[in-house]
Image (spheres, rainbow, N blue to C red):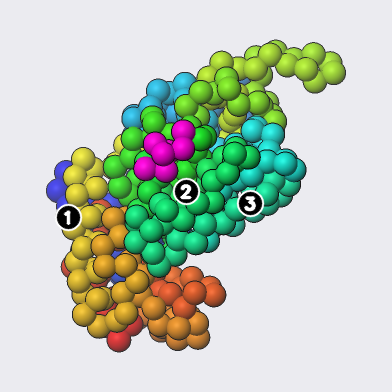
Amino acid sequence: MTFAEARARFPLLERVAFLNAGSMGPLSRATVAAVEAAQRRDADLGRGSRRHIEEVLEARTRVRAALAALLRVEAEQVALTGSTSDSCRIVVAGLGLGPGDEVVTTDSEHFGLVGPLHASGATVRVAPVLGRRRDEALAALLEAVTPRTRLLALQHVSWFTGELLPIDELQEATGLPLLVDGAQSAGAIPVDASRYDFYTVSAQKWLCGPDGTGALVVRDPQAVRVALPSYFAQVGYEPDGSFTARPGAGRHDWGWLGLPALAGLETALAELPEWGYERAAAMTARCRELLGARFDLVAADGGGTLVSIRLGDDAAADAVARAAERGVIVRDLPGTGLVRASCGYWTNEDDLERLVEALA
């Protein structure tokens, strides 16, 4: 599959310079067709038959296997969820964090991660890493660790700047359980999630899947309590609710995903090109080069596929609105004064030139 063929799959790109997969990725024609076909099948044949349930279960198995291959883990280590936020809630609840426990995170995390951490009742220790070099960020994280630390919870790629956080070095230095927010990495850069205790996926972003699709990698599924059980958590249960947990990470599945969502995600995963990571990295480098020549670039070489510039609070929101009027879709990050562009394997040079022109 050539780049031109891959880009042509996305109807949105025929008229829009779409640079916001960090929020929601573009939908391909095939993905939309798969969703529509499954929805029509549900409408024509109904959703409650035995065969329908079997089809859903078969689709879950295929999607789980495809996600496992992408993340370089075993299918038994993948739970199907609706988002990274769902996945974070599963982990925090399953670990039973509470008063007396401590969790270490950073000052640039998404609420989908830090919200559940705070709600657990554990003490959340925040390491200041924003704007710091990688070695400085690691030092700040290690300084926040104490004998009462039960979990390290942070992004792989910063949703503010696109920088890679030192998750590997942190894990090696502490040996503590690590929850990685992979919302801006899974599908954007190569990921081997096998070494991490927990790794989350937002499939509607870089994987270009339908809304409400995601995943959670659990390295040792049996070691985490099923605190938020869905129907899929069990293989048998008693009238009082006691149950026999399903083997593998399937016990942590968030809940029902209909055939339309499963069909769309399966199609989107099958469309990912082998050269996608290399192309996305090249376009990100070019984006940094073009924006850096005109604006205050936040990170010269972040390592992820996000590029942010600093314009100021009011200026950032206004610039994003003006860009949208010119068919260029980026986003501002409220409260930071940053405008963020997301570069995917579908991005081309014209998208980036239109971006610079629109922001200028």
Residue beneath disc 2: 142
Residue found 29% across the figure and 81% down from its top = 295
Q: Height in image: 57 above or below 349?
A: above
Residue 82 coordinates in the image, percent (x, y): 56, 42
Q: Earlier in the sequence, mark 3 or mark 1?
A: 1
Residue found 53% across the figure and 19% down from its top = 248
Residue 4 coordinates in the image, percent (x, y): 17, 55
Query: Quadrant location of residue 22?
Result: bottom left
Few, some or many residues within 10 Å of mark 2 (<14, 14–19, 20+): some
Q: Are the residues tagged 2 and 1 within 8 Å (C-beta)? A: no
Residue found 32% across the figure and 79% down from its top = 296
Dot 3: element: strand
Type of amino acid at the residue the image marks with label 3 = Val
Specify whether 5 is left or right of 106: left
Query: Quadrant location of residue 159?
Result: bottom left
Residue beneath disc 3: 124
Magenta residues, start to end: 169-175
Mark whose residue sits in front, 3 or 1: 3
Residue beneath disc 1: 4
Q: Can residue 36 be spotted in the picture? A: no
Q: Residue at the right extreme?
A: 240
Residue 340 coordinates in the image, percent (x, y): 39, 69
- For the residue pair 92 and 321, the one nearer the viewer reads as 92
Please state, as top left, top right, bottom left or bottom right, where the N terminus lies in the image: top left
Marks 3 and 1 sit apart, C-alpha to C-alpha, by 47 Å
Specify whether 164 is left or right of 222: left
Specify whether 243 is left or right of 38: right
Type of amino acid at the residue the image marks with label 1 = Ala
Marks 2 and 1 sit apart, C-alpha to C-alpha, by 46 Å
